[in-house]
Every structure is written in structure tokens, then in C-alpha cells.
Amino acid sequence: MRLKAFVGPLGDDFPSIFPIVAGVLLFFGTLAYAAGVIDEKNSYFEVRKASLGLAYILTQKGRLSQMEFKSLCDTQAVDYARSKGVKFYAALVPQCDGVKFYDDFRDSVTAGSYEPESCSLTKQGETLDLAEVAKKNPVVVNYPMAVPCPSAGAYTYGLGTVSVVVWR
Amino acid sequence: MKAQAAIFDGITFLLLTMFSVSLMYVTVAGYGQQEDAVMRSAHVMNYMQSFTKSIYFVNAQTLAKICSPSDDSCFREGQVYPWYAGLNDADTGCNALKDYLGSISVTDLLKRDLADPGITLLDDKYGGIPARGKTATRCAAKELMKPFIAAGYKYYLEVVDPTSRQLYSNGDPVPIAKDSQKITNSDDEKVIGKPGQENYERMSGCEEAVKAGYKVLSVSAPFRVTPAKDESSTQETGAEKHFVLRVCIWPSA
């Protein structure tokens, strides 16, 4: 009887191959998944860190005229974003009659009491399309800022925001 | 027997694999939570710092339209929110700021309000003359703290007379005018007290919020005020006083 059940060294171990293969596949599959998720999270953190860094640059003063904003953006912010390997769009949005925040960031960066000043860093030769940016899961941060009010050339300063949109 | 032993080994291996896989999932799920919290806190801090910086430059007269009848964020069903009470008043609310010169900022008014001769009080007056520092700060805070308000946070602003000038450590809040509104969007009596109650004018909302168990984030900005000389006093007054503007936020319950 014992000899009948014996189907050879490989035959006897054969049933155990299925759980072993399943275990190995599950382990390496999970390992690959975990590495992917961690990479994705790290990449998102890098973008968030870059958005904070850009915000620190653009909010170093409590008030900005359009010219000051443009100069700050074109010199320091663009270099910073380039060094971090991210693209960005920043806008100085005048909200002279009261601050408004919208669900869609595209409205927040374009709807102002007068034409907002903006600057950006995109891929070379690429034109900025905020609808395309919205699909790339960008990080959007807004900060208060005193801006010329009621017009861009006014000597009085009123309510406004600095909006920074960062993506890879 | 040998085959059974082999499959038992296989199943044990699978169980061990599943255990290590579950550990990996737990690690992945928790990965970056602290970093996320730090960045969130950095963003909030930078926002609050930007707020304190910007009110130094926002000219009071540009806030005149805040809480006007067309400002929906001030009213609910035609009634002004209790924490914004008075801001819609045409003569003493935000609208009254339109009469100030274009060069006067919110902080200029706040400093003037605190420079009363003899007593330091946030009462919208400089001596007997209107100096709507508290109102201007309330109007500016109502607008600039909107992202936090929308996210369900409460804010509280107070001027503190610090006990130490070197470290700008905690001190006593500068009292507000008797039973007047505080610079907040909270109606929690544990934090802001109740008009008429003892010490209502001298309560520190930030400290009360901590005592009430809220998770409070605060930013302090030092500033100086040169008080007017008190004619009735024989002491030399008019020396510079150091204050701290403290902004606190906490998630509402």
C-alpha cells in the first residue's frame, strides 16, 4: 500500500508547488505594488514641497505690485522650480471687493477684480493649457497678499491672493 | 504521508507570505503620513504668517465693501451671522472704513486703537476719536481667513501684552471694549465667553480654546505702539509699548 501511494520524489511534492508558487507571486506582486505606491507618494510629496518652496518665495513680502510679482517670479521662482524639476503656474489675483475661492482652481487663478498677473514654467516649447494641467493632479495653494486696489496702477493696497499651481 | 507533509509545508509558506504581505500593506498605508502632516502644518503656518504680513499693508478704506448687503458670506437668511454682528452697520461697521485716507492700513488703525492715552484698550477709539482698528481687523480677518472658514475652522485674533520682550512669551490679552464683539468667527462660549460674564473682555480666546480641548495652531507677530501721553498722569508716558498679534485657528467640533 505504501509503495502504491508513492509516485516518485517529484510526484509527492507536486501538490505543494501550487501554494508555494502562489505565495511567491503574491509576495513579489505586493512588493512591486508597494514600491509603486511609495514612488507615487514620494513624487507627490516632492511636488508639494516644491509648491511650499515656491509659495515661500512669492509670499516673502506682505504686499506685491504686479511688477514686483513678475520680477520675483521670473527670477527666483522659475529657477527654484527648474531646480526641483517641476512645472508651475503662479498668479497674483486681485480680489478688491472680497476674497472668493472656487472649487475649480482655474477660476481661482483667473477671476480677479482686474486682469491677474501671472507667470509659469512649462516644458520648453509647450504652451500653457490649464485644462490640461487640471488632468495632471496639480497641487494648488493660495495665500493672502496685499495687492494694488481698485486697479493695477492704484497706490492703495487691498485684498488679493497669490495662487501657486505645481505639477510634474 | 510524505505528500501530506509537503502540502503542509506549502500552505505554511503561503501563510507566512500572507502575513508578510499584510505587513507590507500596513507599511504602505501608513507611509508618508507624518510627512503629510508636516507639510499641511507648514502650509497653514505660511498662510497665517501671510495673513499677518498682508494686514500690515491692506489699506483700511479698501475694506469698506465687506459685509455690505450684497456680501453673501456675511448673512444667512437675511440675518447677519452672530460672530459678524456689527460689521454690516453702515456707520460703525466695515462701511465706516471708507472715510479713512488711502494711506492708512489695517495695522495703522489697530496701533492707533491701542495707543489710547492712559489705558490700552481695543475699543475702536483713540481717546475719544474713532480709530476703528478692531473693526478693520475683524473685516480683514473675515475675508482673508475664508479658506479656513470654508474648511470648518474657527479663528481668533487677539493682541497680547507679552510678559517678556526677549522671547515674546505669553502674556495677558489687551482688553476689548465692554461686552463688544471679538475678532473671531466662533460662537463657542467656552472659548469666547459670554457678554456680561466676569472677565469677558480680558479672556484669551487662544488659551481658552486650548483649555477646551481644541487642537490649536497659532502664529504671533510682534509690533510696537507709541501710546499718547496721558495728561492726567505725572509719570513720563509716551514710551514705546511692545505687543504681539496672535492668530489662532482650530477645527470646529
Image (cartoon, coloured by chain):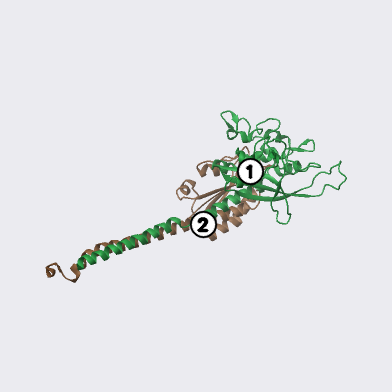
Chain colours: A brown, B green
Q: Which residue is mark 2?
A: B35
A161 up-or-down from B77: above or below: below
- Residue A141, given in percent of the width and then of the height, sits at 55, 49
- Residue A12, given in percent of the width and then of the height, sits at 19, 68
Which residue: 73% across, 57% down? B166
The dot on residue A114 is none
B77 up-or-down from B144: above or below: above
Q: Is residue B7 left or right of residue B188?
A: left
Give the mark, 1 or 2, whose residue is nearer the N terminus.
Answer: 2
A124 or B244: nearer the viewer: B244
B4 or B146: nearer the viewer: B4
Residue type at the position of mark 2: Glu
Which residue: 74% across, 44% down? B111
Instruction: Please name which of the two marks, 1 or 2, marks the residue nearer to the observer.
Output: 1
Q: Is residue A42 left or right of residue A97?
A: left
Q: Which residue is mark 1?
A: B156
Q: Is residue A86 visible?
A: no
Which residue: 53% across, 59% down? A84
Q: Secondary structure at mark 1?
A: strand
Q: Residue furthest top?
A: B78
- Residue B241, given in percent of the width and then of the height, sits at 77, 49
